[in-house]
Image: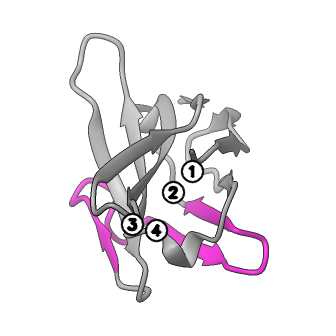
Amino acid sequence: QVHLVESGGGLVQAGGSPTLSCAASGNILDFNYMCWYRLVPGKRREWVADIASPGVREYAESVKGRFTISRDTAKNTVYQQMNSLKPEDTAVYYCNAVVTSLTNRLYNYWGQGTQVTVSS
């Protein structure tokens, strides 16, 4: 079982640069991926970014060049630096961990989410 706890959301002005954090129980280097998703009411959950165990990072086109995913393996924490925020970035942001168990089963774990509201 992996527990994820997000923090860092809140009300931000357009153009702001908050950083979200996701603290994980367990060694994040043992996880296949750690990801950020976001959810807007009435819309489908959107994948935002991920960082694979070897450190490769990928981003959705909507955030590429503005968001940066990083990690601190000593703290088992993943971050998402969000720059140049736009009102359309308003969403609940969720941290996700993809983990392969010792029995080779794939598991998805989710945090509770943190609200980011961007005011224009």
Circle 1/circle 2 CB separation < 8 Å? yes
The residue lying at 57 percent from left, 50 percent from top is: 15
Residue 84, label in figure: 2
Residue 89 lies, with reference to residue 112, above or below; the image says below
The label nearer to you, 4 versus 2, is 4
Residue placed most toward the observer, 119 or 29: 29
In the figure, residue 104 lies in which quadrant? bottom left
Which amino acid does the dot numbered 1 rest on? Gly
Which amino acid does the dot numbered 4 rest on? Phe
Residue 30 lies, with reference to residue 79, above or below; the image says below
In the picture of the structure, the residue carrying the numbered disc 1 is 15
Count residues near mark 4 (Cα–Cα under 10 Å), then give few for <14, some for 14-19, many for 20+: some
In the picture of the structure, the residue carrying the numbered disc 3 is 33
- Mark 1 residue element: loop
On whether residue 80 falls in the magenta region, the answer is: yes
The label nearer to you, 4 versus 1, is 4
Taking 7 as reference, is 46 left or right? left
Give the percent coordinates (x, y) of residue 41: 35, 13
Tell me where the magenta segment starts and ends, as one range. 57-82
Circle 4/circle 3 CB separation < 8 Å? yes
- Mark 3 residue element: strand
